[in-house]
Amino acid sequence: MLIDTHCHLDFPDFEAERDDIVARAHASGVSQMVTISTRVRRLPELLKIAEKYPSVFCSVGTHPNSAAEELDISADDLVRLAESHDKIVAIGEAGLDYFYDTQKPEDQKTGLIRHIEAARRTKLPLVIHSRSADDDMAAILRTESDKGAFPFILHCFSAGPELAKTGVELGGYVSFSGILTFPKSQDIRDIAATVAPDRLLVETDAPYLAPKRWRGKRNEPSYVVNTAEVLAEVHGVSYERMAEITTENAFRCFSKMTRV
């Protein structure tokens, strides 16, 4: 089986056929999914979905491209919300995104550090979004880790080798999406080959970034199979073995997530 550790089932793209999408995921061997928060104020929508489907869990947090909208939400708020429901198994996604330049870096950093504090206090993994911000992200991870360890995931990894190395050295996980399968992503495959097996996760980031086999279509959790196949090739193991590795890693990382 596989676990899609990062998707967005609350997005409008899935509204009309969410039942079918979850059923297709199960049929393809994806036994569980984590639907990831982009705004804390939308948490009730995520919880409604997670409560409907036993195999779906969720997080709570603010995406960096919405950082300024939720600067009033404190680490205490995040901790309180994360501990309020059994289905909330992670903090985030939070981080730094300098590619789109829609939010002030200072606001993004403020939000990220609050999310790190919440992850440290709850022991739930922080789902980290990092784009075009390798140096600042690595520096924050090092500084904050010195204050006290916290679990984290470098999600949808498409950064450079140094950030991957820093993440693993600090005890984090590196999650690969459909980007890994793209013909022009040899650099990402090379980085994936250097990540220790016990630090690997797979995800879709659905509805975005459908892997090569379904390129151009709306992504969905069942498509994580193609990413796991390519990751298996990169590490020179069977698909079945990679599925086993990433599933066990997911349960270790998302320690609050029950096995369904």
Image (cartoon, rainbow, N blue to C red):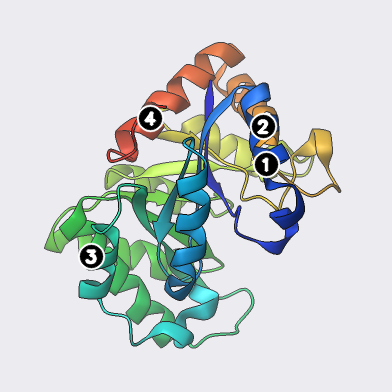
Q: Is residue 73 left or right of residue 61?
A: left
Depicted 76 relative to depicted 34: above or below? below
Foreground of the two, 40 or 254: 40
Nearer mark to the viewer, of 3 and 4: 3
The quadrant in which residue 233 appears is top right
Give left or right: position of 222 versus 167: right
Name the residue that disc number 3 marks.
79
Q: Compute the Cα span from label 3 to label 4.
A: 24 Å
Nearer-the-camera pick, 242 or 75: 75
Locate residue 118: give its quadrant. Answer: bottom left
Residue designated by label 4: 249
Q: Is residue 187 above or below residue 144?
A: above
Other-residue count near label 2 (Cα within 10 Å), few / some / many at <14 / 14–19 / ≥20: some
Q: Label 1, label 4: how many angstroms apart (C-alpha)? A: 27 Å
Q: Position of residue 196 (x, y in %)?
A: 40, 29
Q: What's the residue type where badge 2 is placed?
A: Ala
* Label 3, label 1: how far apart the Cα atoms are: 30 Å
The earlier-in-sequence mark between 2 and 4 is 2
User: Which of marks 1 and 3 precedes in the sequence?
Assistant: 1
Q: Are marks 2 and 1 in contact (CB under 8 Å)?
A: yes
The label number, if any, that marks residue 23 in the structure image: 2
Residue pointed to by mark 1: 19
Q: Position of residue 155 (x, y in %)?
A: 49, 51
Work out whether 247 lies above or below 212.
above
Tell me whether circle 3 and circle 1 mark residues in contact (CB < 8 Å).
no
Camera-side mark, 3 or 1: 1
Q: Residue at x 43, y 58 (%)?
A: 128
Disc 1: CA contacts within 10 A as few (<14), some (14-19) or many (>=20): few
